């Protein structure tokens, strides 16, 4: 992962030397908010916002799912970066439509000329004030969940007030152990750091599997934000994380309840269309040359995601 240092692009991955070989993710740099307050800097308006994403990235995938579920396609347009992230970081196959930039880091410096930090997806851009609203996926999906309801008429709520405490509890458990846990395995540079992450990852997957044996979803009896945040890691697990990130104790296919749950979420209308396995496998295996120096992208695995999920009885 690259970053800008004093305005100069540096193609560096994560520094694990100061953390005993452990992968530590930096915080997002832009944390604005779209809301309906009269004095809000960012108001929900049709056509005002542009979303930059990678189809490979689980964090960006969250935003695409919420854009689809909340029927925001006609209100928020999208630019997709190339799956390969090499010496210049995330790049566009053709110049992006707002400024003609060819590299994502140019979008960051378009917003803040002296920006210093990681250049990540997703990025939510405001065409009106010519800046980045947010590059924090967990907050972008909250905005998408409710800020545009008056425009779309879509009142589906994936963060209902009566379930928020439980959703937050699941998010706080799943993020370090599973969402980020696979990266902690894959980017570890010492055996100790890797095994520590590996054990916490599979302990967490075992816990979720046990929960799903008697509950259809994570929080309550409806699909919530917590489920979608977990989904984007699960959908990549067997295709990438088992082999590339050495998360090979079990596949998701080996967990009967997690596997059925994954298939059910994948089969929700609109979600399959946000999932691109070519981009997913190409990005991880081709771009992470410190892990896979040959850049060979595996042909498999064959994934069964569209057969019956068998969870209607829960």
Image (spheres, rainbow, N blue to C red):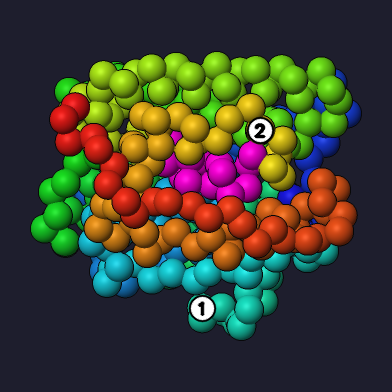
Q: Residue at x 61, y 82 (%)?
A: 95
Earlier in the chain: of badge 1 and badge 2, it is: 1
**Is 148 left, or right, of 283 in this rendering?**
left
What residue is pinned by disc 1? 98
Frontmost residue, 140 versus 110? 140
| Local secondary structure at mark 1 | loop
Say few, some or many: other residues with alpha carbon within 10 Å of mark 2 (under 14 / 14 to 19 / 20 or more).
Answer: some
Q: Which residues are magenta?
A: 230-242
Residue 208 location in percent, x, y? 41, 22
| Local secondary structure at mark 2 | loop
CA separation in Å, label 1 and label 2: 42 Å
**Is 38 left, or right, of 202 in this rendering?**
left
Tell me the quarter of the picture where residue 193 sits: top right
Frontmost residue, 7 versus 172? 172
Determine if residue 121 is in view: no
**Is 286 left, or right, of 310 in this rendering?**
right
Q: Is residue 225 above or below residue 89?
A: above
What residue is pinned by disc 2? 248
Residue 85 location in percent, x, y? 72, 62
Q: Is residue 105 above or below residue 289?
A: below
Q: Residue at x 53, y 60 (%)?
A: 277
Of labels 1 and 2, the one closer to you:
2
């Amino acid at each position: 992962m690259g970053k800008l240092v004093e305005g100069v692009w540096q193609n560096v991955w994560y520094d694990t030397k100061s953390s005993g070989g452990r992968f530590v993710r930096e915080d997002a740099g832009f944390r604005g908010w779209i809301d309906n307050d009269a004095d809000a800097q960012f108001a929900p308006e049709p056509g005002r916002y542009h979303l930059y994403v990678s189809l490979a990235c689980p964090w960006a995938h969250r935003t695409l799912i919420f854009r689809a579920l909340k029927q925001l396609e006609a209100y928020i347009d999208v630019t997709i970066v190339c799956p390969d992230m090499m010496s210049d970081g995330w790049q566009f196959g053709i110049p992006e439509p707002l400024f003609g930039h060819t590299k994502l880091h140019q979008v960051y410096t378009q917003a803040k000329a002296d920006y210093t930090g990681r250049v990540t997806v997703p990025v939510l851009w405001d065409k009106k004030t010519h800046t980045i609203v947010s590059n924090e996926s967990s907050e972008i999906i909250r905005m998408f969940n409710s800020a545009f309801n008056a425009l779309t008429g879509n009142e589906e709520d994936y963060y209902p007030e009566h379930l928020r405490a439980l959703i937050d509890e699941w998010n706080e458990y799943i993020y370090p152990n599973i969402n980020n846990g696979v990266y902690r395995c894959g980017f570890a540079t010492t055996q100790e750091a890797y095994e520590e992450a590996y054990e916490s990852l599979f302990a967490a997957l075992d816990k979720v599997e046990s929960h799903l044996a008697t509950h259809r979803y994570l929080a309550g009896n409806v699909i919530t934000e917590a489920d979608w945040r977990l989904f984007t890691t699960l959908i990549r697990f067997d295709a990438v994380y088992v082999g590339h990130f050495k998360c090979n104790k079990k596949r998701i296919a080996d967990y009967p309840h997690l596997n059925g749950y994954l298939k059910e979420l994948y089969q929700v209308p609109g979600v399959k269309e946000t999932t691109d396995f070519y981009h997913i496998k190409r990005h991880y295996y081709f771009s992470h040359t410190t892990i896979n120096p040959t850049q060979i992208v595996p042909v498999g695995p064959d994934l069964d995601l569209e057969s019956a999920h068998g969870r209607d009885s829960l």
